[in-house]
Image (cartoon, helix red, strand yellow):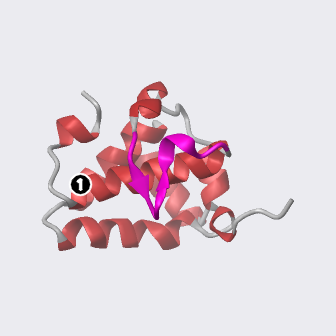
Amino acid sequence: MTTHRIYSTAFASVYPLYVAKAERKGGTKAEVDEIIAWLTGYSPVALADQLAKHTSFEDFLAQAPRMNPARSSITGVVCGVRVEHIEEPTMRDIRYLDKLIDELAKGRPMAKILRS
């Protein structure tokens, strides 16, 4: 089975796109970092380290200190696909992050984004 090319893409190449999307809509880099920390458990230092290493998206998620168990409460559509229906775990986690960034860009309060 072939894997999707996003798996081998460096997370460092996607991260600025997340930040740019958030900032375009009034969000901040700090909020993007908070979302990533909530989802993956990466501290600011560990996130910076992963970005500097140009870790692949797949490895970034596989090496996450603590994937948030509440991520399964994330629902909705990303790229025309319901995230809760994605069977492949890595792709589902990628789409969870996409969905959270979309919610930030739409102006949703951080408490709701982080399922607090």
At mark 1, the secondary structure is helix
Amino acid bearing label 1? Leu
Quadrant location, the N terminus: bottom right
| Residue farthest along the right direction in this orientation | 1
Note whether 31 is above or below 111 in the view shown.
below
Q: Position of residue 2 (x, y in %)?
A: 82, 64
Q: Quadrant of residue 16?
A: bottom left
Q: Which residue is mark 1?
A: 104
* 54 on left or right of 17: right
Quadrant location, the C terminus: top left
What stretch of residues is rendered in magenta?
75-87
Residue under the point 60% across and 63% down: 53
Q: Quadrant of residue 30?
A: bottom left
Residue under the point 17% across and 68% down: 25
* 38 on left or right of 95: left
Residue under the point 40% across and 31% down: 73
Is 79 within the magenta?
Answer: yes
Note whether 12 is above or below 74 in the view shown.
below
Q: Nearer the viewer, residue 89 or 39?
A: 89
* 2 on left or right of 101: right
Binning the other alpha carbons within 10 Å of mark 1 as few (below 14), some (14 to 19) or many (20 upward) gives many
Q: Position of residue 54 (x, y in %)?
A: 59, 67
Is 34 within the magenta?
Answer: no
Q: Nearer the viewer, residue 85 or 8?
A: 85
Q: Position of residue 80 (x, y in %)?
A: 46, 62
